[in-house]
Amino acid sequence: MSANDYNDGGWQPVTRLGRMVQEGEIDDMETALNSGLPLKEPELVDQLLPGLEDEVLDINMVQRMTDSGRRVKFRCVVAVGNRDGFVGYAEGRDDQVGSAIQKAIGIAKLNMIKVPRGSGSWEDRSDRPHSLTRRTTGKAGSVEVEVIPAPEGLGLAASDTVRAVLELAGIENAWTKSHGNTRTTVNLAKATFNALENASQSRQPRRNRGEEREVADQ
């Protein structure tokens, strides 16, 4: 499934960054992220990253008691990426599974980061960016994930959830270590994304992520 299915067309940007993208003043995702302007419109990500893919990592049913009785919602964990250095992560909740997935995809696009990639090891003679440039660690709840650069040909020594996030980011070779309650997919996925986010902090200012942002003019 293409994550760009979220955008049905007819986009009318309402933020300064959106207008700059639509008018061609900004024509690549890295420039948009480094502009200092908040990323509030999923559609501009669709325009700058047309090859974006998504993967649903987890779907859970969440029950809550209200005055009117028991309410059931679905929580979906989604990662999006172009397999070439850009990745986003989010959770979405809704009464319907499909709506929860689409909501998570939209939020994940707003959480997009640029992952610094390199050859993976001082022993590696490859000029192609296929691994991380340095070791990084991320944490969510009790789960901690460490991602370590590796030379070309190793592949991804990782669990399925960690592997899915790394692949969407364009990381092809890496060692990983996971600690804590790694059976909790949401925390494992979030910790992996957090590790990639921490690796990217030397490249761009930190922004608040993981929450749906209200679209407003800037």
Image: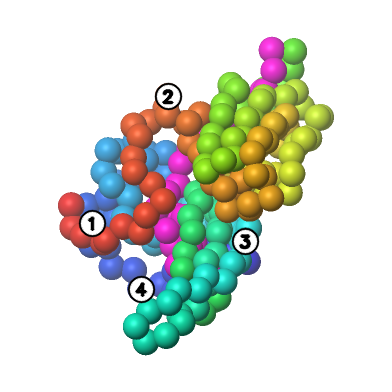
Q: Seen in the image, is 1 located left or right of residue 123?
A: left
The answer to which image quadrant residue 176 occupies is top right
Task: Give the Cα separation between the discs numbered 3 and 4.
Answer: 31 Å
Given this view, does label 3 or label 2 mark the residue nearer the observer? 3
Q: Are marks 1 and 2 in contact (CB under 8 Å)?
A: no
**Residue 21 image point, x, y percent:** 32, 52
Given this view, does label 3 or label 4 mark the residue nearer the observer? 3
**Residue 4 image point, x, y percent:** 51, 64
Which residue reaches farthest bottom? 68
Give the amino acid type for the residue marked by disc 3 in the picture. Asp
Give the amino acid type for the residue marked by disc 2 in the picture. Ser
Task: Give the Cα separation between the discs numbered 1 and 2.
Answer: 26 Å
The residue identified by callout 3 is: 58
The answer to which image quadrant residue 204 occupies is top left
The residue identified by callout 4 is: 10
Height in image: 116 above or below 124?
Answer: below
The residue identified by callout 1 is: 15
**Residue 123 image point, x, y percent:** 74, 13
Task: Give the Cα separation between the discs numbered 2 and 4.
Answer: 36 Å
Task: Give the Cα separation between the discs numbered 3 and 2.
Answer: 30 Å
Asked if the magenta segment contains residue 174, the reply would be no
Task: Give the Cα separation between the discs numbered 3 and 1.
Answer: 32 Å
Height in image: 134 above or below 92?
Answer: above
Give the amino acid type for the residue marked by disc 1 in the picture. Thr
